Image (tube, grey):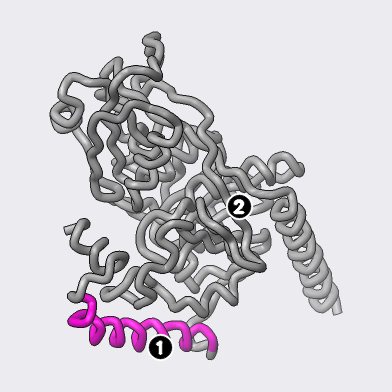
Amino acid sequence: MQSLVNKIWYQGHPLRWLLLPFSLLFALITTFRRSLFRLGIKSQTQLPVPIIIVGNITVGGSGKTPTVIYLIELLRHHGFNPGVISRGYGADIQGVKVVSPDATPKDVGDEPAMIVARTGVPMVVGSKRVDTANKLISEFGVDVIISDDGLQHYALGRDIELVVIDGQRQLGNGYLLPAGPLREGAWRLNQADFVVVNGGPATQGQFEMQLVPCGVLPVKPHSVLEFDANQDLVAMAGIGNPERFFDALRQQGYQIALTHAFDDHQAYDKTQLSDVAIGRPLLMTEKDAVKCRDFAQENWWYLAVDAKLSPTFDEQLMSRLRAVIAAKNEADCNNRRKLKE
């Protein structure tokens, strides 16, 4: 099914024409929903700390998780205490849930489990992002909140919007769901504060991001086996764009004998992946690795990557954040003065 969808969205498959009427319906529904917030019929909750949305306008992976990790480290470097919220896609979450360092993807979702395992950041997941944000503020005292996805979750007020685009796939055929991969039209990019292009050329006003490999690590915790970069490998990936991962491995000189692409957010088991590996070492993404820690074999590995953005991006983001904080402080002072009057 995923293969057919990719052909429709990115390779010009004629089935897209049959789906266009449904895309028109999707456009009408989403336009109506946005109008409810714009006219104040539906309310948007503003919170006392800055909210940075890291999202996209396409379905599927574009590099949001590495971007979130990059922002966590950037904010910490500048003296902030950030926290992260997420819906926890793929997990059955009632209310809100704090993500612990040993949380499993089944409990909190694969991306939250990976983010906390990598950074130790305070993180809360749940379907109602306002509730998750309030939990972060009350329990952890964070002073900046990063929302992993949620660009279209308009109930949560936002101070900075950062949209990530897949530099290879871009916006696909340019159609809204289901004929194309777009959740919102390309016009939405003009409303965002920052547009980051992952692994492709950025146009004027956008920022280019590269995912830089930072080592091959064992999936099995505390494994002492050393990785041999010259051995034949089987590569697997269950992300939005698996071919990007496979291409990156080949470009780095790894000997890839076979590749296997899974659907994004897919759950795995030991037998399934042992059959994929067919006795060879298995190399996967970090996002996949968090789902395999409990049953990983000694010769299963993952490639860790770090996002890299320009100093200009860092400067502009921090400048924008400081302006947001100043405005919130001024508004708070004005409100207190009015209460005294």
**Circle nearer the N terminus (1, 2):** 1
User: Does 110 sit above or below residue 229?
Assistant: below
Q: Secondary structure at mark 2?
A: helix
Name the image quarter holding the C terminus: bottom right
What number is the disc on residue 32?
Answer: 1
Viewed as shown, does residue 138 lie left or right of 233? right
Q: Which residue is mark 2?
A: 137
Q: What secondary structure is the stretch in magenta mostly built from?
A: helix
At x 30%, y 48%, the residue is 265
Quadrant hosting residue 223: top left
- Indicate yes or no whether the magenta region holds residue 231: no
- Indicate yes or no whether the magenta region holds residue 33: yes
Q: Position of residue 185 (x, y in %)?
A: 44, 78
Span shown in magenta: 16-38
User: Does 16 sit above or below residue 76?
Assistant: below
Structural distance between the alpha carbons of marks 1 and 2:
32 Å
At x 33%, y 51%, the residue is 93
